[in-house]
Amino acid sequence: MRNDPAPFLHPRPAAAKAERVATDTLEVCLNRLGEFEIPLPIPVEQWIEHPLGFEFGVEDLSRFGDGVLGGSLVYERRIVVDTRVASHEGRFRFTVAHELGHMLMHPSLGRVFLESESPQDPRLQHIERQADRFAAAFLMPLPLVMRELFHICDRNRLERRACIVELLCDSPASEWLWRTRFLPAITRRFGVSLSAAVLRFQDVRLRGDRQPFMPHAIARRALKARWQRSPVPEFRIVEGKPVAADGRCESTLF
């Protein structure tokens, strides 16, 4: 991964700092471990302790209040995650990485940071959003995400360039690709939740483009519970293209 930028994707300006810190932290891990390739899913809960040197624990955090999922105890150099989260792999890993983000990006802003299911204090929304962006960037490095996008295209016999461009569109074909091919593969490969993957694709752009890689409309639908229960449009792949079951090409660009 060293000095291997994603060929097409880059973070939106608001996410640039979190992206930079996450990339630098991954480089530190590789250097200290003497490795050149990042394993997937990234073993964040292991790397917190070694090589990054923080303490890590899974425990009952009810002493901090109702709904607390994780915490960064800055002066103790300790990250903790509530036992309720441990059984949900994607959420667990994202919470761990989120707290690591606080440790690395916000040590001068507080002694304790707590992630809670309760509504956020408006004064803390900026740093909480920044920690979320760090977590997404740390768990889903852009060069590896781009590589996986191409692998998904190849496995499904999709024409790479046209498929990547189609994903940018709010079309039936794009939603079918995201829903049945790309999001399931990305969440499995990187060990993240659906919401984490959506956050990541909303925060990155094609180079030279101002629009998010995942269209806002598709992202909004993806985060609604009923999206998982609603019928999936029927498409099949013909000559590298998503084609509706009735034989029509419903793509915007193919």
Image: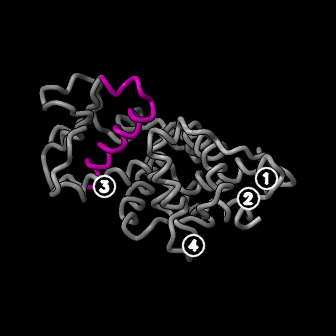
Q: CA distance from mark 1 to mark 4?
A: 28 Å
Whichever of labels 2 and 1 marks the residue nearer the N terminus, that label is: 1
Secondary structure state at the residue bearing disc 3: helix
Question: Label 2 belongs to which residue?
Answer: 250
Q: Is residue 137 magenta?
A: no
Which numbered disc covers residue 53? none
* Magenta residues (range): 84-105
Q: CA distance from mark 2 to mark 4?
A: 26 Å
In terms of depth relative to the viewer, which is nearer, 197 or 252?
252
Where residue 236 appears, as percent x and y from the top left, is: 79, 46
Identified by mark 2, the residue type is: Glu
Q: CA distance from mark 2 to mark 1?
A: 6 Å
| Image height of 42 relative to 153, above or below | above
Specify the farthest residue to the right.
239
Q: How dense is the environment of label 3, judged by Cα within 10 Å: few (below 14), some, or many (20 and up)?
A: some
Whichever of labels 1 and 4 marks the residue nearer the N terminus, that label is: 4
Q: Nearer the viewer, mark 3 or mark 1?
A: 1
Identified by mark 3, the residue type is: Arg
Specify the farthest residue to the bottom.
208
Residue at position x 17%, y 37% from top? 76
Question: Label 1 belongs to which residue?
Answer: 243
Where residue 252 appears, as percent x and y from the top left, is: 70, 65
Question: Label 4 belongs to which residue?
Answer: 207
Residue at position x 33%, y 45% from top? 98
Where residue 111 appears, as percent x and y from the top left, is: 13, 46
Whichever of labels 3 and 1 marks the residue nearer the N terminus, that label is: 3
Secondary structure state at the residue bearing disc 1: strand
Question: Label 3 belongs to which residue?
Answer: 129
Q: Nearer the viewer, mark 2 or mark 4?
A: 2
Q: Is residue 96 magenta?
A: yes
Magenta stretch, overall SS? helix
